[in-house]
Amino acid sequence: MKIIITGGAGFLGQRLATALLQGQHTLSFDQLILADIHLPCSPLDDPRVSCVALDLSQPQAAEALIDAECGVLFHLAAIVSSHAESDFDLGMQVNFDATRQLLEAARRKAPAMKFIFTSSLAVFGGQLPALIDDGCAVTPQSSYGTQKAMCELLINDYARKGFVDGRVLRLPTISVRPGKPNQAASSFASGIIREPLHGEPAVCPVSPDLALWLSSPASGGAQLYPRRHVACRGVRHCAHRQPAGHQRARAADAGCAARGGRRAGQRPGAL
C-alpha cells in the first residue's frame, strides 16, 4: 500500500511522516510519498520514502500523484489564513481547487482510498453558542475559512456517494511551533512564547482574555491518525473528541509561560 502526504515538507507533514515510519500508527505500507511545492526531505533514512516537488494547483498534478496503489492520502497542503485572505486567487487554487482535483483523481483511480483532510476552526465565525457541537452550522468570515468549509462539504458528499472514504479533522492551533512565524493568523500563539525565550519582542494582537484551543506539536501530530483504526464509511454524524494533551487557554496565560509566570503588559517595558 502507498501513503501520500501533501504538504510533506511542512511542520505537521514531517512529524506525521516520522510517526508513520517509526511504526507509531497501525498502518502497513510499502511506500510513503511526501509531496510539496518545494522538494521535501525525508525525516528518516528509509527506503520506503519518495519525495516529490509538485504544484497541486496545476491541472495534472493530482493525476500524477494518485494511482490505484494509494491507500491513504493525508491532505495537509494549504495556503494559510492571512495569506489566503490577501491572495484570494491563490487561496482558491490551492485550498479548494486542488482538493477537488485530488478527490476526483481518487474517485477514478482509488475509490477505496482514505482521504484525510485537515480543516480548521476558521469554518466558524460571528456569534457562536457557548458549546459548539456537530449540529452547529459553519459560518466562516474569512476566505480561508470559506475554502475549508467548502472542502468539508465536498469531502462529505464524496464520502456519502462512496467515491472516497473521507475524514475531516479540525485541528487546534499548534503551540509552540519552532522556526520563523508563517502567515497564519494564529501564529502569534507560538510567537508570544517562542520569541521572548530568544530575547526577542513579541506582540499579542488579540485581547488577553481570548480563549484559544491549543495543542502541543507532539499531541497535534499524533492525532492525525488514531492508533485504533475506525471504519467511517456511511457515517454522516460523528461526535468530536478532544484528544488528550489539547488545552483551552487564554492568550494572556500563554504569554505568561515565557516569563516564568509574569503577565505580559501592553508595552514592551512592562515585561
Image (spheres, helix red, strand yellow):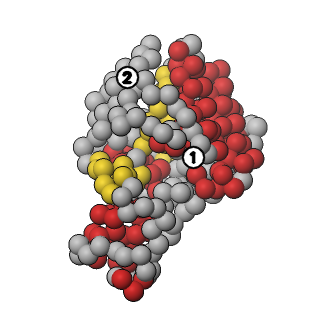
Residue at image coords 47%, 32%: 168
Note whether 13 is above or below 99 in the view shown.
Answer: below
Q: Is residue 168 visible?
A: yes
Q: Amino acid at mark 2?
A: Cys
In the displayed structure image, the side of residue 202 where residue 80 appears, left or right: right
How many numbered discs?
Answer: 2
Give the spatial CA distance, label 1 vs label 2.
24 Å
Q: Which residue is mark 2?
A: 238
Regarding residue 46, the answer to whether it shows in the image is no
What residue does disc 1 label?
Answer: 77
- Please report the residue visible at 42 percent of the width from the left and 43 percent of the height from the top: 171
Assign a secondary structure to mark 2: loop
Horizontal placement of 174 versus 104: left or right?
A: left
Q: Quadrant of residue 240?
A: top left
Most foreground residue, 122 or 44? 122
User: Residue reaching furthest bottom?
Assistant: 269
Q: Residue at x 53, y 15 (%)?
A: 160
Q: Nearer the viewer, residue 125 or 83?
A: 125
- Image quarter hosting the C terminus: bottom left
How far from the left and from the top, in percent, is residue 242?
30, 38
The one nearer the camera, 74 or 258, is: 258
**Residue at point 36%, 49% (across, down):** 213
Out of 254 and 14, give the one closest to the viewer.
254
- Local packing at callout 1 (Cα closer than 10 Å; few below 14, some 14-19, many 20+) is many
Q: In the structure shown, which secondary structural element does the residue marked by tag 1 occupy? A: loop
Mark nearer the viewer, 1 or 2: 2
Q: Position of residue 117 (x, y in %)?
A: 51, 36
